[in-house]
Amino acid sequence: MTDMKDMNDLKEMKDVNDCIFCNIASGEMDVPLVYEDELVVAFDDVSPQAPVHTLIVPKQHVASLNDDPDPALLAAVFGAAREVARLKGIADSGYRLVQNNGADAGQTVHHLHVHVLGGAELSVQMS
Ligand code: AMP
């Protein structure tokens, strides 16, 4: 008989297999990386909303902040965002980090990610 843990493992496998950001992070989908370390990858957004628009994505599948990600993973994501800003030459001119969770925020890819936006003066509107 399949127990609850097996069911959760199966669901997690399905989530990972269906997840476009997991496929990019694993290298299965060939996308040029802006940055990579042990815990995260960064790549340019396919539909940029600013001259610089890069996504920071944990290698581990975490659907959103509600999934209680390891604080070390969140620290890695923010550290990578700072490094990406430096690599993209926008550390001094300024940049915005955006992180959407759930429907009202407009989250479309259900794998935790942070947007790094910059390279021009951004709108002051927050919503
Ligand atoms: P969010 O609305 O916060 O879930 O953001 C998802 C982002 O992922 C959007 O800005 C999309 O343009 C971007 N995106 C979706 N698929 C890809 C892809 N294959 N490569 C790069 N960016 C992607």
Image (tube, rainbow, N blue to C red):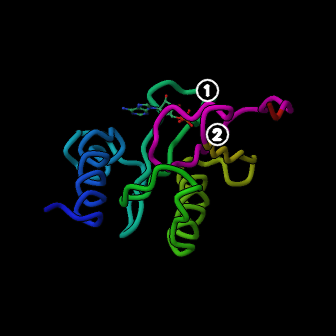
Which image quadrant: the C terminus? top right
Marker count (numbered): 2
Q: Is residue 56 left or right of residue 7?
A: right
The yes-or-no answer for disc 1 within 8 Å of ligand 1 is yes
Q: Position of residue 85 (x, y in %)?
A: 60, 52
Based on the picture, tell me whether residue 11 belongs to the magenta stretch: no
- Looking at the rendered structure, the secondary structure element under dot 1 is loop
Q: Residue at x 68, y 32 (%)?
A: 104
Residue occupied by mark 1? 49
- The image quadrant where one finds the N terminus is bottom left
- State the residue at coordinates (61%, 43%): 101
Left or right: residue 127 versus residue 26 is right
For the view shown, which residue lies furthest in the bottom direction? Answer: 72
Q: Are marks 1 and 2 in contact (CB under 8 Å)?
A: yes
Q: CA distance from mark 1 to mark 2?
A: 8 Å
| Dot 2 amino acid type | Leu
